[in-house]
Amino acid sequence: VRDKLQIADGDIVEVEPAKFPESLYHIRNKLRGKRLVYEEIFEIIQDAVRGNLSEVELSAFVTALHTQGIDLEEAYNLIVAMVNTGEQLKLEKETIVDKHSIGGIPGDKTTLILVPIIAAAGLTIPKTSSRAITSAAGTADKAEVLMPVDLDIEEMRRVVNETGGCIAWGGALHLAPADDIFVKIEYPLSIDPLMLPSILSKKKAVGANYLVIDIPTGRGSKVKTIGDAELLAKDFIELGKRLKMKIECAITFAEQPLGNTIGPSLEAKEALEILMGEKYVPDVVDKVTHLAGMLLEMVGKNNGRNLALQLLKTGKALEKMREIIYQQGGNSEIKPSDIATGDYGIEIKSEKSGLVQWINNNVLVEIARAAGSPKDKEAGIVLHKKIGERVKAGEILFEIFANKQNKLSRAAKISEESKAYGVGERQEMLIHKVVEPPFHKKTFILER
Amino acid sequence: VRDKLQIADGDIVEVEPAKFPESLYHIRNKLRGKRLVYEEIFEIIQDAVRGNLSEVELSAFVTALHTQGIDLEEAYNLIVAMVNTGEQLKLEKETIVDKHSIGGIPGDKTTLILVPIIAAAGLTIPKTSSRAITSAAGTADKAEVLMPVDLDIEEMRRVVNETGGCIAWGGALHLAPADDIFVKIEYPLSIDPLMLPSILSKKKAVGANYLVIDIPTGRGSKVKTIGDAELLAKDFIELGKRLKMKIECAITFAEQPLGNTIGPSLEAKEALEILMGEKYVPDVVDKVTHLAGMLLEMVGKNNGRNLALQLLKTGKALEKMREIIYQQGGNSEIKPSDIATGDYGIEIKSEKSGLVQWINNNVLVEIARAAGSPKDKEAGIVLHKKIGERVKAGEILFEIFANKQNKLSRAAKISEESKAYGVGERQEMLIHKVVEPPFHKKTFILER
């Protein structure tokens, strides 16, 4: 304190207690079940951003939102307050499109292929992404393998103006910074009441007016049933209307990883191979072109999906990706073989013959993280078999890669203890017995 | 009223307003979020059984239980009150076992095979079952194809004493009759807060002290995720401890119908064919022997599943089933060919080639019900393909049977309009787009 206030020895200092933040009254009202109005919400968000609220106070706020719920009006006001307490991109464009996945499916490299397709179609897509929180790799982690992603807002504006698109890390941009504060509270609590406001505030801050939200849906995912996905989609669409943002949602299949790789470098490599036409990974191309097609049709193009496929096949998307890489300061000549993967590897083989009946996404994420992902970019998993494929006893199901032997061993141990793959001629009818009140191990997926 | 009171013309009658039922105060307290104690719960249940509560009052009670929730203590007290306001079986046996499915998987003929296996092992299993409420066929509907099921409590006791088992309809027995009253309220409201008390009160009323609860789990089922199934299992096990009933739960796969048939006669026929060894239906045998094996091991037998399989294979279970049929007053010589199925049929063929990716249980139930099931016992569905099987364009996916042409047409129309089967080389990544706030069509499954 003395350094900060530049006080010399012997100076006289007046001390008075810090003002009790007003927003605490509002938090207490929310705890009692009262709905908050804009001014109250703004005060809370502002105090959070300015550092006037302690972790105890922030925790009470997040908990109150979780237990009391927030209605659409409160969600809208949260978004506006979060936008107004941060930076805004302010592009000089009438049509700005964006895409966001709420997360929950490992191996999702959709953004790395969709952004160049959309920009190659002549549209503006100022994409910001986050790093992994609970997953094996965030989109920012994956993009960083190909190019720098920690742009500031001026740099982001320049890249988008030059190329029509970008893939930037949201963290350095100060767009809706309240979210970054709340995420730190939500993570240890394993609750996420601010998901909708946090996603839409970031999109509003870049000025998006056409948005596709991807809701990966499956038993191991964040959203488990199609019914739940539809309820969430409804909230997104309704909030979009208030924000003057046209939103469509895609409910997508998430019962197994997307594509054949998990981990930043492995996924960046797979995306580059798909862009270069060196590999055809059906589920990745299927998902990317569906989502890109929805965006293209929202702004008035015909046969959106086909157009997206053409931009990918003709190499136009690859060309655009190289422009974006160049403008963000990366090596625009990068080849898949330039991308290193972990030096240590182990093959996990099937114990029996049959069809792959199921894949446990959460176990694969646990394995990839134990192997070092996302911090060790080269660590991760390569899948050799997906659901429905035939496998013989002794055949490889997947490989684990790591930079260090001890991390590889830890990952291999998890693979031994938890089942990542179910193989059999048909689905066993008994999933499991519950004999004693079970210890409830629940995986929490928090991604932005 | 005059008939009931046997009043003659000119008699003098004193009229006074009916006493305001005390239990209304308790219902009102529950509405306000107060927990109810045993005496209050007993009064409500007694008034319900005696007909002292109107539909409005019963509806408020069920709604209060749904919105306020019930804790384990209240659930326990509900069970005890429901048992004490009905008949009890009172067998002179130390060990009484039972099995119950919470429902939600069409084609489940487990009981018809499990009961004779368990009885053939020398155990006592006084099984009561219900008729369909929202499903295509209740176990009582299926069993009735083979034998009378509307036993009274004396007859049930006799059959169990003679054979060790029975498959009786619960409706004529007056075991925990409050449940039959509440079900009529829950059905139009599409809520089921009394599921646990209603199931366990029926089991307590027959004196069961070893119980396996089957929790079919899958996206189209009553319980959609394994996490939810585990939470429910925990409640069952805990309540069992208070009721001095050893309970184990089986979380079973329910993403497609069990076996190849849906509808009372078709299912009874399939069960009989399995018991006679004329057909081997892997998923049915798998499920039956797993559940039977759990029960056998709970009472101290080794290798329960193997024992169950032996009793099935050697024909001991069939022999026991014929005894039960005989004692319940049916034709113990019944053959599968004696069981008629609908005169009118239609084959539903696949439009494309590929693998069966998914089956929509709820659509199949809708089709079977439109065809006349469960009222027309001969109506229903025969599945020719299950998940993971290869099908060619033009090949039959399933057949619909009905007693009347107009019912068959209605069922066929539903099959045309709603997709029961998903066929393709692989799972499409886009499940569906949500462009406008969706109309939420939710299937409610209420079974006992």
Image (cartoon, coloured by chain):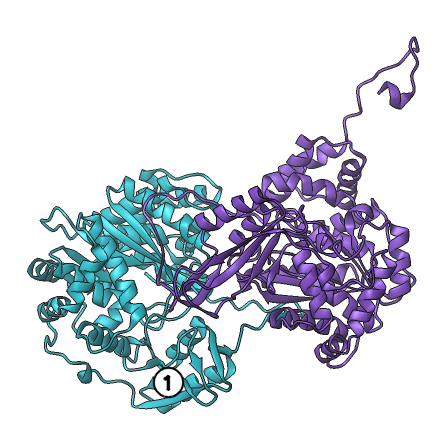
Chain colours: A cyan, B purple
Dot 1 falls on a residue whose secondary structure is strand
Asked if one can make out residue A206 in the rendered structure from this viewpoint, the answer is no
Q: Taking B83 as reference, is A152 above or below it? A: below
Q: Nearer the viewer, residue B375 or A414?
A: B375
Q: In percent of the image, x 39 and y 54: which residue is there?
A: A58
* Quadrant, the N terminus of chain A: bottom left
* Quadrant, the C terminus of chain A: bottom left
Q: Taking B210 as reference, is A402 above or below it? A: below
Q: Nearer the viewer, residue B3 or A31?
A: B3
Q: Indicate the position of residue A329 as horizontal and vertical percent values.
A: 10, 72
> Would you name the residue on which mark 1 appears?
A399
Question: Is residue A89 rendered to the left or right of residue B112?
Answer: left
Q: Taking B403 as reference, is A415 above or below it? A: below
Q: Taking A127 as reference, is B193 above or below it? A: above
Asked if one can make out residue A354 in the rendered structure from this viewpoint, the answer is yes
Q: Amino acid at mark 1?
A: Glu
